[in-house]
Image: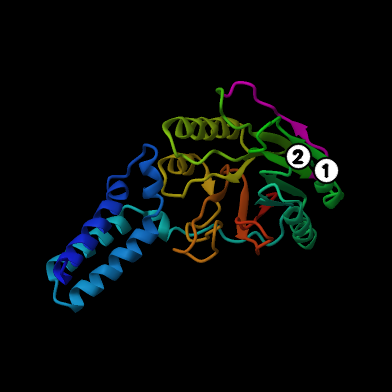
Amino acid sequence: MTGPKDMFLITGALILLMALPALFNTKGAPLELIATLRPQIIVVAFAFACAAFTVGRFWSGGAAVLVVAVLLVTTPELFSRAPSPVTRPAMKVVWCNVFQKNSVVERLATLAQKQTADVVILAEPPRDLARARRALSDYPFVYGAPDPGEHGAVVFSRAPLTERPRSDLPPGVYPLAIVETDQIRIVAMHPPVAVSPSAMKASTAMMAAALDEAAAGRTLVIGDMNATPWSHRLRVVSKQMVRLTPALGSTWFSSLPVLGLPIDHAFVTSDLRASTTVGPGVGSDHLPLIVSIARD
């Protein structure tokens, strides 16, 4: 029969087991998926430490505090600040993973009108774009890289677009929607969830391609990255571009930190001044991003 002491030890061991991929900054799939849960692990470990100290389990509580401290120190993104808001943007971009639902597109179109957005980007767009085109009729210029699985993104714009298709991506990689409008390059992407080494490889290849596009300058990279700011892949992007989205700005499952995860992100090259806000729910499991870009 398991006693209270055994339950404490079992619970503590499970928390430590969950924390190990984050503590060792695991980069390989699928263990990296556990490492994305750093905020949740921190909260659970802290709660365990409080319970342990309350009942006099000081060694267990101390070990849990150590885990919390190491995770906080190795996750500086949790304390990062987003750039100052752009008050008079020259361009506004609204992004959302609409999960192939036309009803979400229609709500997003209403949000875009309220925001006077210049560009609207749909990830996982509906298979039949006719209804989406009607909802976004104020955005007549449309481009989406060919994608039989509908995992990519489609760009709708008020102004004409110059398409920049890439044909050098490895097989199995979701396409990137790359366009230029008003002298700004936009790279819209939706990498796969890194549930396997092949999916991780595809995600890494897409982000490398996005950075290659950004080398030209005046570029916005935006997408449902299926990765958190403390993932190795996004840390690489953050070293070369400015991340606009705060780490605590959860966009998937819930807008509340810890209950949700920040997996939708926007980056710009250093020659652009921009800011991002997380928009209200429009019926998807993702919240939209609203990006404001200044023209200095």
| Left-right relation of 130 to 169 | right
Q: Mark 1 — residue?
A: 159
- Give the mark nearer the N terminus: 1 vs 2: 1
- Name the chief secondary structure element in magenta: loop
Q: Mark 2: which secondary structure?
A: strand
Q: Which amino acid type corresponds to the residue marked 2 in the rendered image?
A: Thr
240 over 8 or under it: above or below: above
At horizontal 86% and vertical 43% (from top left) the residue drawn is 140
In the picture, measured across the screen, residue 282 lies left or right of residue 9, that is right
As drawn, is 52 to the left or to the right of 167?
left
Residue 167, magenta (yes or no): yes
Q: How many marks?
A: 2
User: Is residue 270 in the magenta section?
Assistant: no
Question: CA separation, marks 1 and 2?
Answer: 7 Å
Asked if 116 appears above or below 268 in the picture, the reply is: below
* Image location of residue 90, percent across then percent down: 74, 52
Numbered range of the magenta stretch: 157-169
